[in-house]
Amino acid sequence: MSEREVLELLRENARYSTADIARMTDLSESEVEAAIEDLEAAGVVRGYQAVVDWDKLEDERVRAEVELNVTLDRETGYADIAARLARFPQVTALRLVSGDYDFDMEVEGDSIREVSQFVSEKVAPVPEITQTVTHYVMTSYKENGIELGDGDDDDRLSYSL
Amino acid sequence: MTLEQSERASQVPPSGIRRFFEIAEERDDVISLGVGEPDFSTPWAARDAAIASLERGQTSYTANRGMRKLREAIADYVERFDLSYDPDDEILVTTGASEAVDLAFRAFVDPGDTVAIPQPSYLSYEPGVGLAGGEVLPVQTTEDDEFRLTRDGLEAAGAADADVLVLCYPNNPTGAIMTEANLEPIADFAREHDLTVFSDEIYAELTYEGSHASIAAFEGMQERTIVFNGFSKAHAMTGLRLGYALGPAEGIDAMNRIHQYTMLSAPTTAQHAALEALASCEGDVREMVDQYDRRRRFVLSRFEELGMPCFEAKGAFYVFPKVPTEWDCEAFAEELLREEGVAVVPGDVFGAGGNGHLRVSYATGLEDLREALARIESFVTEHA
């Protein structure tokens, strides 16, 4: 159960120090460290990344959501196709989904041209892929549970009883 | 000509924290742990319901007692505290729990009546008693008892002869809670001495160990108790001003007779928000309570580390540390504000029983709490 608590806190802010996590839970620092090690060893926690608002940077970052339809045969399953696609560094997320298409793929690149070329030259030609629909991200409002707006100012009085 | 204040109005004391406001105004880097309201916004679903009600043009008065549907939802909600009230005539929706408190003093306190109030305690009770012409009987609670009210404390204060006993648990400013076992002797005392009880349970949902117990749930207590609760703390709705009173039908009727002339009805928009808050915001409340609990543990740990002992407050969003013995709590709070820009409320504002303590609110994000505690630590170290 303590692992679950630590996991929740890391999901909230992966940069919380083990000392702060210990203070917020009833765990000792060494127990927190052990819980994090266990979570990493078990592959539950796969990494720690910054949540970026690309609009705040001058460098362009192009992202697209790509819908993929595939056909399967006896030798080729979803996992085979996924493994092939996931190896491309341009692919930042890949999920099998229910509904009108099979895979939901997120792609990143430095330009629209780069992303378009990647989809048309590397993804579309894969024999099992029958259709691709590319949606370029125009603006992002929320990433990883974090709203990207300017935030609400704390307009409370400094003292209230 | 000058407006001549009534004697009653002139007896109402000015706020004990006004001068702190003025000092805080002078700096722009103040981190405030002096706030008695949530840092969260009202859950979006509740705000959205309020907006939708405005779009539909639902801007007229409601029934004096509040929308029937809301009273039904409140009746369902308070069942979690083992309370059972009839939405027809035992629930009154008010403009904040504050209005319910005010109505109760007006409806049940006559000139010369004695109202026993545990100290330290939230500040609005004393003026309420004063305006009704009653006398306040302070009942000290102590850190040794974790600021719980005890039967011994009531007896020592002479509360047996009081007419009304006010309870406020989870407590502002100490963060103390009263468990069922703690409340039982108090309920016995109230029955034995025929006391009316006002139980302010506005922080009920913010209970971090066990679950909240209401004195009204004890045998023979519902008929002598008025419970105050509301949406300000649990549902982060302070500015929407919505609370309620629960009590026996004739008591609620007395309060409603005053309410119908002084308030007519609680704000309609807020009632729509509250209805949605009860219908769908349980998850938001749990999430906020979890956050408060983490911050509570964090703040308690930090005070311990920096050498300011602090009993384990298990409710509301306050801790109540002791200032170092060489300090007076007013001076400590003022110097801390001037030197480090950290706002806390000196405990004596809440009655003499709070002397030597600070009310520290953790209704503030963890980053600010971390920074504020670091500043307190350097302040304490510097003045050691």
Image (tube, rainbow, N blue to C red):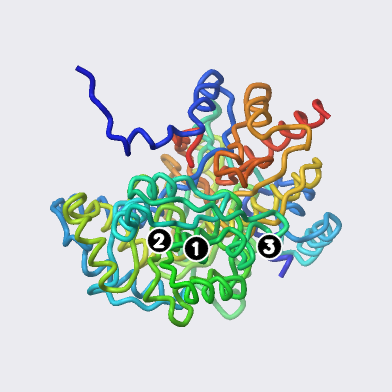
* Viewer-closest of B275 and B64: B64
Precedes in sequence: disc 2 or disc 1: 1
Secondary-structure class at tag 2: strand
- What residue is disc 3 on? A5
Tell me, yes or no, whether dots 1 and 3 are on the same chain: no
Which chain does the numbered disc 1 sit on?
A: B
Which chain does the numbered disc 2 sit on?
A: B
Q: What residue is shown at x 58% (from left), y 37% (from top)? A: B345
Q: Is residue A134 in sight in this rendering?
A: no
Q: What residue is shown at x 43% (from left), y 60% (from top)? A: A131
Query: Residue A126: x, y in percent?
Result: 55, 60
Which image quarter is the C terminus of chain B in? top right
Secondary-structure class at tag 1: loop
What's under tag 2, amino acid-wise? Asn
Query: Residue A151: x, y in percent?
Result: 47, 37
Query: Residue A74: x, y in percent?
Result: 58, 81
Q: Which mark is residue B204?
A: 1
